[in-house]
Image (spheres, coloured by chain):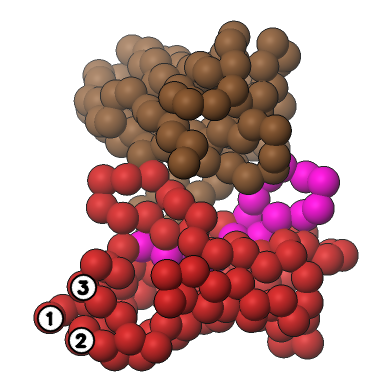
Amino acid sequence: GDSVTQMEGPVTLSEEAFLTINCTYTATGYPSLFWYVQYPGEGLQLLLKATKADDKGSNKGFEATYRKETTSFHLEKGSVQVSDSAVYFCALGQTGANNLFFGTGTRLTVIP
Amino acid sequence: GAVVSQHPSWVICKSGTSVKIECRSLDFQATTMFWYRQFPKQSLMLMATSNEGSKATYEQGVEKDKFLINHASLTLSTLTVTSAHPEDSSFYICSASGAGYEQYFGPGTRLTVT
């Protein structure tokens, strides 16, 4: 079945450091891939997405490229800020289906 | 953007009692709502999908008689945990989608059963 494996946290970085959170997936067909972010006390928000191989999703300085050959969708940011501290979830969704498959989430803490 | 609220944000109840959690889409009509459960350090697990006016579709292994879902309007879905037990303690999250397939998530409800 479809599944997502996400890098375990927590991750602690200093401000302006480079961030990578690994995400790999197992799926049939051609799923869409997502990164969601959950700030303290809030619901999950869509951060970025990619719907086909080699697509790059980007938002707020974060990027992730849909790599079919390595079944990966790693999240990167060149210079993190304290305000990026949150829990990040990688997710997979099949075309035409409503449900999403989530990774376990990675808690990021950025210290000044 | 689309906003989804949940109420209550946290609840403590005694074993054997029932608890109702509300999920509301505040600024859009949600034709489909989803209920997830999240255990500590684990991913969100889909419990059920409900379409307005229809019976919910439960995922395998989720007891429909224990987790009652009602989606009576385009802005409200409720999850009732009946005869709650300590193993039902968890973080329950709802999401809603409207015309598109994107899901908008509520902030979650932490349930503790003593």
Query: Which quadrant does the C terminus of chain B fall into?
Result: top left
Marks 2 & 1, CB-CB < 8 Å contact = yes
Q: Measure the C-alpha gap from mark 2 to mark 1.
A: 6 Å
B55 up-or-down from B109: above or below: above
Q: Magenta span: helix, strand or loop, mainly?
A: strand
Magenta span = A87-101
Chain in red (letter) = A
Q: Is residue A97 magenta?
A: yes
Chain B is which colour? brown
Query: Regarding mark 3 in the picture, which secondary structure is present there?
Result: helix
Name the residue beneath numbered marker 1. A112
Q: Measure the C-alpha gap from mark 2 to mark 3.
A: 8 Å
Marks 2 & 3, CB-CB < 8 Å contact = no
Viewer-closest of A66 and B46: A66
Quadrant of the image occupied by residue A79: bottom left
- Place of residue A41 in the rendered image (x, y in percent of width and height, measured from the top left): 26, 46
Marks 1 & 3, CB-CB < 8 Å contact = yes
